[in-house]
C-alpha cells in the first residue's frame, strides 16, 4: 500500500472540492513517503455522530454533501470512492471536509458523456439508445436485443410516475444489475466503483434526512450538463479532432492507392492508378479546408438547433438561442 498515493489523490481532488467550499486536509510532503503519510488535523466531528449533526441541522450537511458527490462524478471525473459518514468531517463553522482518500475513482470524459447519454435516454424513454449504451459498456456481445429493450422498458415503467422521495437508488441499481445478469452483460470496473459510491452517498443522505429533495439538487446539474455540451470551446475542440483525423487519413491516399494497384496487377483486370504527391494532397486539403470547416459549422448548427426546443424548457428560450448562436459563430470565425 502506497500511502503517498492517497496524498496525491487528495491534492488533486482538493483543487476541485475547494470550489464547492469543501475542505481537504493539507499534506506535509517532507514527512510523507510510501509507508507514512502526515496530514493536517481537522477540528470538528464526523458526520457519523448523528446527535451532533442534528444540533447543527441535517440540511446543512445533506445539501453540500450530495452536491459534492454528484459534481465530483459528473463534472470532475475524479471522485472520492468511499464517502461514508466517517470520512465526512463537519468543521466548527459548519462547513464540510472530506478525509481518507485511499479509495478514489476516475471517469474519462468519454465515459461521463456515456453516462449523460444514458440518463437522457432513460429520461426520454428512448429504450433503444439506453440499450446501445449498455451494449457499448459490455463490449457489444451477442444478445437478444428485443428482449433487452423490453426489460429496460419494464424497468423505466416500474419507476415512472413514482414520487422521487419514494424511490430508492439501491432498488434501481438492484433491478439494473438483475437485467445485466439475465443478459450476461458485464460492467466496466470504473462504472462499478461509481455505482458503489452513489449507493454509499444515497445511504448517507437518507439517514440524515429521509425527505431530502433530490430533484431540487439534480435540476441545476441537468441544466449545467446541457450547457456544458453546447460550450463553443467544446464543439470547436471536437471539430478540430475530426478535421485532424480526416487529414491524417487523406495523407495516406498514395500508400492506399499503391496497394490497390499491386492487387489489381495480380488479377485478371488492369487498373491504372495515378499517384498524387504528398505536396499535391496537402495543397488540396488547404484549398478545400475552408469549405469543409463551413460545412461542419452548418451541420453543427443544424444539430444544435434541433435541441433548442428541449433546452428552452430547462434554461429558457433566450438562453438556448444564445447558446446555439455562440456555437455557430464561434466555429465559423475559427474557419
Image (cartoon, rainbow, N blue to C red):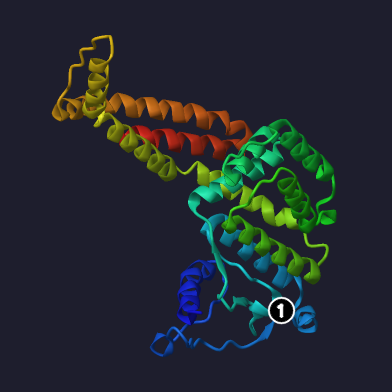
Question: Which residue in the structure is indicated by mark 1?
Answer: 47
Q: Assign the C terminus to one quadrant of the image.
A: top left
Q: Is residue 136 above or below residue 41?
A: above
Q: Is residue 226 or residue 243 the one in the foreground? A: 243
Residue 331: percent from left, percent from top = 37, 35
Residue 247, picture quadrant: top left
Depth check: give the residue in front, 289 or 55: 289
Question: Badge 1, how many Cα within 10 Å: few under 14, some, many 20+?
Answer: many
Between 330 and 67, the one nearer to me in the picture: 67
335 vs 272, left or right, is right
Provide residue 321's location: percent of width, then percent of height.
53, 34
Question: Residue 156, position in %: x, y?
Answer: 78, 41
Indicate whether 254 appears above or below 43: above
> Quadrant location of residue 208?
bottom right
Residue drawn 58% across and 33% down?
308
Q: Is residue 234 left or right of residue 129?
A: left
Amino acid at each position: 500500500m502506497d500511502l503517498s498515493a492517497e496524498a496525491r489523490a487528495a491534492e488533486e481532488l482538493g483543487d476541485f472540492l475547494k470550489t464547492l467550499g469543501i475542505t481537504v486536509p493539507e499534506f506535509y510532503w517532507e514527512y510523507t513517503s510510501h509507508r507514512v503519510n502526515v496530514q493536517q488535523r481537522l477540528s470538528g466531528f464526523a458526520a457519523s455522530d448523528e446527535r451532533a449533526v442534528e444540533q447543527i441541522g441535517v440540511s446543512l450537511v445533506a445539501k453540500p454533501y450530495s452536491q459534492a458527490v454528484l459534481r465530483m462524478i459528473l463534472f470532475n471525473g475524479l471522485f472520492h470512492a468511499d464517502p461514508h459518514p466517517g470520512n465526512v468531517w463537519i468543521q466548527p463553522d459548519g462547513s464540510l471536509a472530506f478525509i481518507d482518500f485511499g479509495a478514489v475513482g476516475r471517469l474519462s470524459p468519454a465515459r461521463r458523456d456515456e453516462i449523460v447519454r444514458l440518463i437522457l435516454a432513460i429520461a426520454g424513454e428512448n429504450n433503444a439508445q439506453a440499450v446501445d449504451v449498455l451494449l457499448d459498456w459490455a463490449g457489444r456481445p451477442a444478445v437478444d436485443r428485443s428482449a433487452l429493450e423490453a426489460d429496460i422498458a419494464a424497468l423505466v415503467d416500474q419507476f415512472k410516475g413514482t414520487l422521487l422521495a419514494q424511490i430508492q437508488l439501491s432498488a434501481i441499481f438492484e433491478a439494473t444489475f438483475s437485467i445485466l445478469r439475465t443478459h450476461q452483460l458485464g460492467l466496466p470496473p470504473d462504472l462499478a466503483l461509481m455505482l458503489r459510491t452513489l449507493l454509499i452517498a444515497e445511504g448517507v443522505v437518507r439517514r440524515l434526512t429521509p425527505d431530502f429533495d433530490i430533484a431540487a439538487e439534480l435540476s441545476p446539474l441537468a441544466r449545467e450538463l446541457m450547457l456544458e455540451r453546447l460550450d463553443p470551446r467544446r464543439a470547436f475542440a471536437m471539430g478540430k479532432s475530426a478535421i485532424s483525423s480526416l487529414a491524417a487519413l487523406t495523407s495516406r491516399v498514395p500508400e492506399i492507392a499503391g496497394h490497390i494497384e499491386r492487387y489489381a496487377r495480380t488479377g485478371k483486370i488492369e487498373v491504372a492508378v495515378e499517384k498524387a504527391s504528398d505536396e499535391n494532397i496537402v495543397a488540396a486539403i488547404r484549398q478545400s479546408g475552408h469549405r469543409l470547416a463551413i460545412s461542419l459549422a452548418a451541420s453543427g448548427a443544424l444539430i444544435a438547433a434541433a435541441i433548442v426546443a428541449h433546452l428552452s424548457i430547462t434554461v429558457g428560450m433566450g438562453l438556448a438561442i444564445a447558446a446555439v448562436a455562440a456555437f455557430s459563430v464561434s466555429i465559423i470565425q475559427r474557419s
